[in-house]
Image (tube, rainbow, N blue to C red):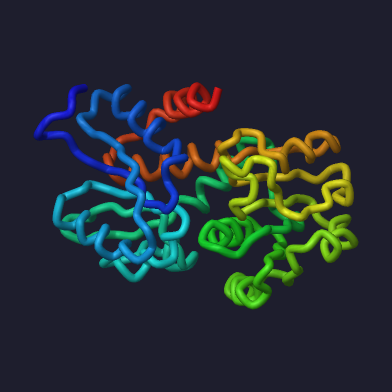
Amino acid sequence: MPIDAHTQVVGVLGYPVRHSLSPTMHNAAFEALGLNWVYLAFEVPPERLAEAIAGMRALGIRGLNLTIPHKEAACSLVDRLTAQAEAIGAVNTLFWDGDTLVGDNTDAEGFLRSLLEAGVEPKGQRVLVLGAGGSARAIVYALRQRGASVWLANRNLQRAEQLAQRYDAEGVLPLDAAALAPQLTRFDGVVNCTPLGMHPNEETMPPLPIANLPAHAWVCDLVYRPLETRLLREAHAHGLKTVSGLGMLLWQGALAFERWTGTSAPVAVMARALLEKLA
């Protein structure tokens, strides 16, 4: 559908953001449903976030996603938070409820859907979460809500301890290979919430001694570009079940799409568009 004076605009704010696949999946969804909408990527440095959201209000932009490093800072820039966003303390989706700008978080539900779709049920399991930023908040919240026992590993231990206390996590470990090595045998799963391994730094990975994980363990990497990160390659080489970040990207996006449009997202179309882009 051609862009015209009636086209509704949505998009993503991040810094950096040019790697984002969100425009690919959302624009495919709009086309499939015949909606006169367009999804754009806006590279916004942290010090300009408040101006960008003010611009959203002034220009009538219908919705936004927020990615690194804006998820926590945006909480104070909206009119209202959903219960889930307030509990997580981070926002990844902005939508309008009448004249009220609402901050929501679809990361937690999107993450859980991606795990369950991959055949992983975290209920009753012990899971190690790497990182303590905005994405980690959503993942820890989701895992605790599902009934998993959670530990955090982060370079900044104070930040991790604050997050652990917020969600009644079991404890905190240094994000360091030597410190993690003797601890890994007791974990059922690991989730990487750091940007290590993200394009263009594809050969980096968190300091995780994969060989120390038990044979039944699973490894999830929220990084989705590349589709198979170095972390996932090494986990697969050790015979572990792996879950890419593509599923979470897909499901959090589908949920955001529904917030904006009031229409069920064409998930199969969105998934196909993502896979074709990554091929």
Q: Quadrant of residue 23?
A: top left
Q: Nearer the viewer, residue 204 or 144?
A: 204
Relative to 62, residue 3 above or below = above
| Residue 93 place in picture, x, y as percent | 37, 52
Left or right of 56? Residue 197 is: right
| Residue 79 place in picture, x, y as percent | 26, 67
Extreme residue toward the left, this view: 5
Q: Residue at x 38, y 63 (%)?
A: 46
Question: Disc count in the image?
Answer: 0
Q: Quadrant location of the C terminus?
A: top right
Q: Residue at x 61, y 55 (%)?
A: 194
Left or right of 49? Residue 201 is: right
Left or right of 106? Residue 97 is: left
Relative to 156, residue 198 above or below = above
Q: Quadrant location of the N terminus?
A: top left
Q: Residue at x 73, y 56 (%)?
A: 127
